[in-house]
Image (tube, rainbow, N blue to C red):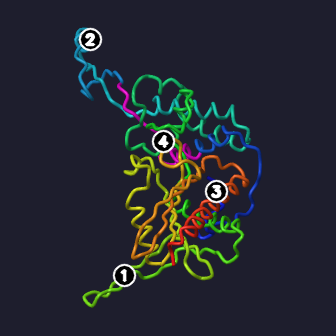
Amino acid sequence: MLLLMQYARKTDLSLVRSEHLAAGRHSFLDLLGMAFADAAEAGLADQLIQTYKISAESLPVLRGRLALSRQMRRAFTSPQLIECDVDQLDVNNAFNALLKWAAEALVRSVRSSTLKRRLHAIAHKLPGRPDRGAPNRGREFAPPPQFRVWNEALQIASLLASGLAHTTGRGIQHGYSFVFNMERLFEHFVEISLVRALSTLGDSEVTSCRQASTQYATPHWQTKVPFFSRPDNLVVRNGKPLIVVDAKYKRLSDSEGIRNRKPINADVYELVAAMTAHRCPLGLLVYPRVAGDAVLTDSELRMWTVQAFGKCLFVGALALDLTGLRTHADLHAVDQKLGAALSSLITEWTNSNDWL
């Protein structure tokens, strides 16, 4: 993912310079402790979790609910008092006990002395005695809705108490993550990889440009709105359009074309329309290949011909396996695969002699 981001455009990333930063060693538990401390401090700034607790009281007036069985037993010993069950809000509950346990457990585990002091202060402010058993008592462990500010701290504490961790599988747990616009990121990746791939062809007259817009439908007198074609990338030779390259971030095995081992019709229609608008004889669809994708193997180029107005157009589809990207050498290998596909597409078209 980080290697893909290196191919993103600068306008999609922002660098904010910070001052007075420090560097130091942190373990994974330090990072988890920071997340817990941030969430717990946000909860303490709001309010402590309080739950209703039933207490038995003997009062001269009725308060709460009448405890009939106890009242009958004391009818002759203390007839002037009424036995009541009173519901009262109390901070000594399982939620605060778990939070206190997690804070103390993290104090013993983290390396940062500053973080240790933060967690120790949190544990000191939380009431009650530490207890890690609450999440394992077979019930949904969530605070009342008015205390939802504590949800993140309780989720971290529950994972620690249960001996669990987040995984990449599908589940119902909440966690922390980075969010990327993968569609745009993949388009930018193909855009930069295309420039590097063309350099491997050894033809200095072949260059690329991104999102070249051209009008392909002129409005008739009834309307004033034209149609424009704007593909992701356009490869030109000596200023003449040669190849339309369109990146599609989708899983081919989920498409309707899996039975025929081909891209879906909508992708091909869009590509051919762009080829017609830019008067390009060649078009290439580039997909990411993922595990279990049975339509296209890594760097396998499939081609089709389209007869249009006496011309033969060549349409290609290529899947690039990005799951193995680990080093810059892997990026170079992807560039070479894309360059080889472009070279094969140009060679097939040149040998056909159908485009005059």
User: Which badge, 2 or 1, comes first in the chain's sequence?
Assistant: 2
Bounds of the magenta segment: 38-54
Mark 2 residue element: loop
Name the mark on residue 174. 4
Amino acid on which the number 1 mark rests in the picture: Ala
Amino acid on which the number 2 mark rests in the picture: Arg
Name the mark on residue 217. 1
User: Which badge, 3 or 2, comes first in the chain's sequence?
Assistant: 2
Residues at badges 2 and 1 in contact (C-beta under 8 Å)?
no
Q: Position of residue 103 (x, y in %)?
A: 60, 35
Disc 3 target residue: 337
Q: Nearer the viewer, residue 96 or 67?
A: 96
Q: Quadrant of residue 233?
A: bottom right
Mark 3 residue element: helix
Q: What residue appears at the point 28 percent right and 86 percent down from the top-left corner?
A: 223
**Disc 4: CA contacts within 10 A as few (<14), some (14-19) or many (>=20):** few
Residue 116 lies, with reference to residue 101, above or below; the image says below
Q: Quadrant of residue 350?
A: bottom right
